[in-house]
Image (tube, rainbow, N blue to C red):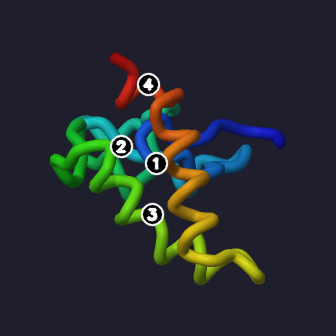
Amino acid sequence: MKGNVCQSCGMPMGTTDELYGTEKDGTKNQEYCKYCYANGAFTTECTMEEMAEICVKPMVESSEGMTEDVARSMMQHVLPTLKRWKA
């Protein structure tokens, strides 16, 4: 896969900057998506488990054949590997 994945939710952000979050000065942040990071801060303060639940619905809606259980399982495996959630 080309491009980055959000280091908060794991969403693929592609090679263009349209999905990248922003810093306070408006520059694009290369690590986080616009849904997780805007104006230099995370858009929501949540636990890793809460982030997994936030991601389930969009994953099911955007992936044909994806079930909530599969999406939840994927998030439980992916999130701990991302920068925001690493201990």
As measured in the structure, the alpha-carbon distance from the residue carrying label 4 to the one carrying label 2 is 17 Å
**Comes first in the chain, label 2 or label 3:** 2
Disc 1 target residue: 9
Residue 70: % across, % down? 63, 65
Residue 67: % across, % down? 63, 77
The quarter of the picture where the N terminus appears is top right
Q: Give amino acid for label 1.
A: Cys
Mark 4 and mark 3 residues within 8 Å of each other at the beta carbon: no
Residue 47: % across, % down? 23, 44
Mark 4 Cα shell of 10 Å, populated few (<14), some (14-19), many (≥20): some
Look at 43% across and 34% down and name the residue there. Answer: 29
Disc 2 target residue: 22
> Closer to the observer: label 1 or label 2?
1
As measured in the structure, the alpha-carbon distance from the residue carrying label 1 to the one carrying label 4 is 10 Å
Q: Is residue 65 above or below residue 38?
A: below
Q: Give amino acid for label 4.
A: Lys
Mark 4 and mark 2 residues within 8 Å of each other at the beta carbon: no
Q: Which mark is residue 83?
A: 4
> Closer to the observer: label 2 or label 3?
3
Mark 1 Cα shell of 10 Å, populated few (<14), some (14-19), many (≥20): many
Mark 3 and mark 1 residues within 8 Å of each other at the beta carbon: yes
**Residue at the left extreme of this rendering:** 45
Q: Is residue 64 above or below residue 40?
A: below
As measured in the structure, the alpha-carbon distance from the residue carrying label 2 to the one carrying label 3 is 20 Å
Q: Give amino acid for label 2.
A: Thr
As measured in the structure, the alpha-carbon distance from the residue carrying label 3 to the one carrying label 1 is 7 Å
**Comes first in the chain, label 1 or label 4:** 1
